[in-house]
Image: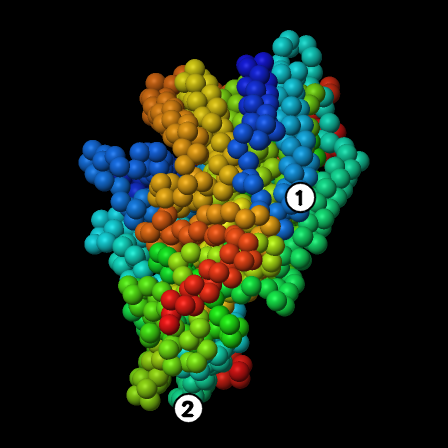
Amino acid sequence: MATGEFAGHIPHAHAAPQSFIRKWVFSLDHKVIGLQYYFLALTAVFVGMFLSLLMRIHLVWPGVSLPLIGDIKPETYLSLLTMHGTIMVFFVLTTAPQGGFGNYFLPIQIGAADMAFPVLNMLSFWVTFVAFLVLIAAFFVAGGAPLHGWTGYPPLSALQSAGPGEGLGADLWVISIALFCIGALMSALNFITTTLDMRAKGMSMMRMPLTCWAWFITAILGLLAFGVLFSAGILLLLDRNAGTSFFVPLVTVNGIMAAHKGGSPLLWQHLFWFFGHPEVYIAILPAMGLCSQLVSVFSRKPIFGYKAMVYAMLSIGILGFMVWGHHMFMSGISPYTAFGMSVMTMAIGVPSAIKTFNWIGTLWGGKIRFTPPMLFAIGFVSLFVTGGISGPFLAQPVLDIPLHETFFVIAHFHLIMGVASIFGIFAATYYWFPKMFGRMMNERMARLHFWFSFVGTYAIFMPMHYTGMAALLRRYSQYTELAYMHGLAPLNKFITYAAFITIAGQFIFLFNLFWSMKRGEKASDNPWEATTLEWTTATPPPHDNFGGLTPVVYNGPYEYSVPGAPQDYLMQTDAATKAVGH
Amino acid sequence: MGLALLLVIWLITFISTFIFLAKIWWLPTGASAAAAGIDHHFTVTFILMGIVFVAAQVFLGLFVWKYREQNSSRKALYTHGNNTMEIAWTVLTAVLFIGLNWASKPLWASERFDPAKSGAVQVEVTGMQFQWYFRYPGPDGKFGATKPELIDPSAGGESAVGLDPADPASKDDVVTGTMYVPVNREVEVILRAHDVIHSFFIPSMRFKQDAVPGLAIHMHFTPIATGDYEIACAELCGLGHYKMHGMLKVVSQEEYDKWLAAREAEKQ
Amino acid sequence: MQESTSTVSLGHREDRWRGELNFDSRMRRARLGLAIGLIGVLMIFISFTSAYVVRQGLPTFDPATNTLVRDWFSVRLPGLLFLNTIVLLLSSGTMELARRRTLEDAKSADAALSAESRIPWLALTVLLGLSFLVGQWTVWRELGASGFYISTNPSSSFTYLLTGMHGAHLLGGIFALLAAGTVTLLRRPIESRAVLIDIAGWYWHFMAALWVYILCLLEFAH
């Protein structure tokens, strides 16, 4: 039942589809498309997690032969890590928060009936889906999946002779990424147009929930970055198959001269990281927007510093395009360029810090409710801090000398981008599940899942700072050859055991997700007593989101505990009780 | 639940900080002239960032416990923020972060802006799947020419780097699989790679630089303690990446001269 | 909880629902989407440009002389390329005429005007576009005949790359025009047609401008 002030009764553009194909397969409904993206990401994350478990097993027990999989040879290990990184970064972190929840909730939170271009939306999902299939196919072709890492540096990734898996597997990898870029660009177009052109009356930009700001800025980053990755992919494909030499200088592999000359391996790195750095912000911004949302809802307090939060996200977006060189301090770039990039990198730490202070500031003086989404939001803040703190070490080139390519880097990006973003996805799931499926997820299981994940991920990734400082290098399939690495074996074992336990805990979530769809306690339209537009509409929302009505917005998105108000939350559409100063 | 969160967050924070402070695992002992400066700056960064880390987690834990919803009569504080505080902590964070980085500039400059001093010991380091080779120019002080078509890794030594016997400067070039340098003298390395990107990493020397095919990158370091130091490849280069290692032997000047002379003699 | 459903008059800005969206709003939204999409496409060609510039200036190690040399030797562009350019610019002209005429039809009260007695500007654009692509293919064959293939030297690589990528995008534009032609023949509502042709038109002009840029890059940037 829609509540609040609504304007008139307008029929939706396209009537609800009837056939199974139009309803669930080639749906134009952003809610269905959002769920399609979400379940794609869910599949991908379990594949990615499985690959990382195999990696951890191999590092601790290199000789062991596993059932069904057999021996893990050095090249197999490297293809596991390549595919783990590629699947996680693209098909989980760039898919669930934006394609999944963004698609589902951006239109509703701004008061629109759908995305601006529903057909394009549908196509963008299917292109992404095909990209995933192409990537997985790499496992099954002759030579197997590529071994060049998710960053795919040439000449290793450009020469078919450079290693096993660098044949057809590597071609499929490039094609998959190119397809993903196309899907991402289409999606970015939709998000930006929708945000700019389809906000309901009264929903000014500065009254949008911070989730919408996050999705909007993420889409802008994607629009500007994915084209660059696409170009790099085309050039790499040509170097691999058409005999060009964009990236490959004169090289000899095992004494045999390759038919290339004059190219620059650094050119790939510049193009890749020009995309790659904004990409990490694409992965984390939606979670930041959600965290802002959740700490506000569940502290019953407005977000501390809404404007600062918006400016911080904008600064992160802009600065994100000026720091890519910090991935290349040791690559052979000019040390002057390196230092310039490092100053910008330190600068980008500032808006991130501001956001953290504001989250903590929102908790201060609040009335905190420890619902499952809130637990994961709090966990997000803690993990974001920990992951963020290692940043200023790596950002300084002189400290990057001992730390580059070690497990210190792995600890940093897993905590701040991997785990933090995944916590955002969990939080979003627990938060919006009632709206999407009409039922609550089981709270006991959710709490258990939280503790497994929170303690577990710290147990996995905190020790990696120590091994990294001790110069344990990444992308090594085993640590048997260098004497100085032998002493780190106990720590590596600890990490592997922690991984087992943490991954086991994720099955609680998986069970809870599907079980609750059928057996969860029925949810009201607004179980969290939250103020944003999705909670004004039916559960699940009707085809056109608002049952033929257009919302009219009077208040900001975080009007909790307004003095003198009849209850401790004020819906955005509530005209009667006007909030102070918004 | 608030108490549980506080305890767990604080416990994780204090245990992990303790392990850092106790240096149970830490950077390897430094053995180069640059190490002291780098390690000192690392410590400064560590202390400052450590304080931020502990403070943030402590406040997070404290607030989630202190401001938990206990009775329904207490109302949450209605505020949209505080601009003064925003400005204050923005400025402080900026000063801290950028100041810290700026303080490291002289170190970086001495490592990378300035070329090796004249009189440095020159060693050409070549990486290839999956082995490091070291070439010394010999008494004439000149590196002989190399030709890609002469590269033959299976033959090792001079053939592995593709040394061109036709060039007179090549005659006294010494190619080895182990790197010898004299202590307390600057070493200039010229980094090359034959096939894919490798990275020349000597943890104890705080030295790391990618070796890129098509480029000859000049870097320098000064070892200050004799001993054997492991060299690791620090850029994914193929299936043998994990076993592409070498050894740096830092010896006295006399021992170095003796060793080099012996290698020259072997060539006759 | 307030539950009022007061009616607010639906002016220009309130019409955000696609079905009820008035023509101007639909057009504006479609053009906004196109402009944003073109930024994405632009980034692809900006990346190629930066790769081009970097590669031009890059010295490469010549094993014969053991020194660094510049190995950029610009490919001589066949004259046909300039003829193709004229064809594409002409097609931009016919496209604009098609676009404007459809827009007039959409705005005029007499929306049921038939198209039989008028010059088929859209069809002409498709024809000219296809001629351009055939012309580009012929240029490739000419280059091949004079020994310049995609892998011959860096300059030839970029020549094939840039013309190929542009051609691929133009082909996409031709599909859009064919779709526009189809909806015209099927007599779909004039407003929908006008939006489609308008978007296809602006895309087409962008492709023409992009082509002129690529030509200048290949011809003049040494």
Which percent across, then down, holds residue A305? 70, 35
Q: Residue at x 43, y 44 (%)?
A: A474
Local packing at callout 1 (Cα closer than 10 Å; few below 14, some 14-19, many 20+) is many
The answer to whether any part of residue A277 appears in the image is no
Residue A110: horizontal and vertical position, in percent? Answer: 56, 40
Which chain does the residue under circle 2 lie in?
A: C
Residue at x 41%, y 70% (from the top left corner): A249
Provide residue A114's location: percent of width, then percent of height.
46, 43
List the single residue furthest toward the bottom: C79
Tell me which residue sits at (61%, 47%) in the image: B35
Placement of B254 over or under A348, stated as above or below:
below
For mark 1, give the secondary structure: helix
Kindly state the secondary structure of the residue where label 2 is placed: loop
The residue to which callout 2 is attached is C79
Crowd tier of the residue under label 2, counting other residues whose Cα lies within 10 Å: few below 14, some 14–19, many 20 or above: few
Mark 2–mark 1 Cα distance, whole angstroms, equals 62 Å
